[in-house]
Amino acid sequence: MSFILIFGTLLIGCTPAKPATQAQLDEIATKCGLDTKTFVLETPSRARIQPNVDANFKAFDCGLSEIRKIPGLEFGFVGNEMYQADANGNPIKEGDGGY
């Protein structure tokens, strides 16, 4: 009898996390003052993060802190390959004073 009670308790404690929704991510973005396109749900367990180039650092930090609270959600950053350009369209490289 005690085996059944212990086993039942273990099963209750191991319930899987609810899948994330785009609405949750949009709510986080709005709460933190970010564009709702910052967080895009690709699958119920994976999100893509792509902040605007001019996004406020504290707002993005808020969003990142909130998105990390969603259990079972993996995320990755997009945009590392982007570069800034000067007024003539020439790329600004690190050390040019633009970065």
Image (cartoon, rainbow, N blue to C red):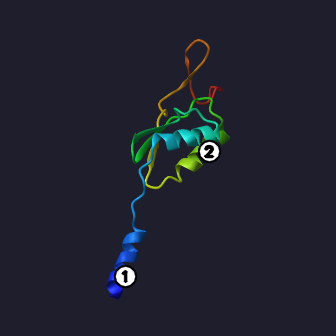
Between 58 and 32, which is closer to the camera in this rendering? 32
How packed is label 2: few (under 14 Cα within 10 Å), some, or many (20 or more)? few
**Rendering quarter of residue 17:** bottom left
* C-alpha distance separating marks 2 and 1: 44 Å
- Name the kind of residue labelled 2 in the image: Asp
Between 19 and 67, which is closer to the camera in this rendering? 19
The residue shown at (64%, 26%) is 98
Q: Secondary structure at mark 1?
A: helix
**At which x and y percent is residue 46?**
41, 45
Which residue occupies the extreme front position in the image? Answer: 1
Which residue occupies the extreme top position in the image? Answer: 88
Which residue occupies the extreme bottom position in the image? Answer: 1
The residue shown at (58%, 11%) is 88
Dot placed on the residue nearer the N-terminal end, 2 or 1: 1
**At which x and y percent is residue 41?**
43, 40
The residue shown at (66%, 27%) is 97
Question: What numbered label is drawn on residue 61?
Answer: 2
- Name the kind of residue labelled 1 in the image: Leu
Left or right: 21, with 96 as reference point: left
